Image (cartoon, grey):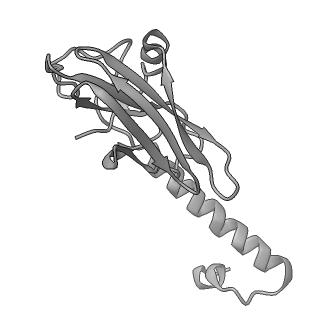
């Protein structure tokens, strides 16, 4: 079968189904590999030292919200994450990023086919950890933000890599 035959939609019978499956597998593999390309600094076993390229020193008047996603499953699903309507990053598999904010209440939103929300109360000098969980949706997977215990989060984040700016 030629390359043009692979993409042709007028193939009869089983060849048509086989060609569509092959295209789906190729596209799925390409998307999965693209999602695995997280290449920033590793979180390591605990928070990276402040001042490294990935993590700046937390300003004393602010608090910090870390966002992370550990699961590689559903690598093609990488919706944006917003804090009070401002885009702050993406739910990248095996990745983490953070934002620093003044003390107060902040709404975190992640949207795929459905919108998932979480409210986080930021305190001066304290870090909060939000895990971006993948679950099955009606059409596509959905990402749900969950506030985590710092000890649990830092262990789960050990192999994640920085995806922020």
**Image position of 51 with respect to 68: above or below:** above
**Image position of 150 with respect to 14: above or below:** above
**Image position of 7 with respect to 20: above or below:** below
Residue that extends furthest to the front in the rendered view of this protein: 104
In the rendering, at what x and y percent does residue 40 appear?
29, 34
In the rendering, at what x and y percent does residue 18 appear?
76, 71
Q: Is residue 85 visible?
A: yes
In the rendering, at what x and y percent does residue 123 appear?
29, 18
In the rendering, at what x and y percent does residue 162 appear?
31, 32
**Residue in the foreground of this view, choosing between 106 and 143:** 106
**Residue in the foreground of this view, choosing between 158 and 17:** 158
Give the residue at x 44% y 51%.
Answer: 34
**Image position of 43 with respect to 24: above or below:** above
Give the total number of marks visible in the rendering.
Answer: 0
Residue 153 vs residue 56: left or right? Answer: right
- Which quadrant holds the C terminus? top left
Residue that extends furthest to the bottom in the rendered view of this protein: 10
Give the residue at x 50% y 13%.
Answer: 152
Q: In which quarter of the image is residue 61?
A: top left
Residue 31 vs residue 138: left or right? Answer: left
Q: Can residue 91 be seen in this view?
A: no
- Which quadrant holds the N terminus? bottom right
Residue 52 vs residue 163: left or right? Answer: left
Q: In which quarter of the image is residue 48?
A: top left
Give the residue at x 23% y 30%.
Answer: 101
Q: Quadrant of residue 41?
A: top left
Residue that extends furthest to the top in the rendered view of this protein: 151
């Amino acid at each position: 079968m030629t390359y043009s035959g692979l993409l042709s939609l007028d193939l009869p019978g089983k060849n048509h189904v086989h060609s569509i499956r092959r295209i789906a597998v190729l596209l799925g593999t390409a998307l999965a590999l693209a999602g695995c390309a997280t290449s920033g600094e590793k979180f390591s076993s605990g928070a990276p030292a402040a001042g490294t390229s990935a993590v700046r020193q937390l300003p004393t008047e602010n608090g910090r919200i870390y966002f992370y996603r550990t699961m590689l499953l559903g690598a093609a699903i990488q919706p944006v994450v917003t804090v009070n309507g401002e885009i702050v990053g993406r739910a990248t598999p095996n990745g983490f990023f953070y934002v620093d904010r003044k003390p107060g209440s902040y709404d975190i939103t992640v949207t795929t086919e459905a919108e998932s929300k979480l409210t986080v109360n930021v305190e001066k000098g304290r870090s909060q950890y939000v895990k971006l969980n993948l679950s099955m949706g009606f059409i596509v997977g959905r990402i749900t933000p969950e506030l985590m215990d710092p000890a649990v989060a830092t262990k789960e984040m050990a192999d994640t890599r920085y995806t922020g700016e």
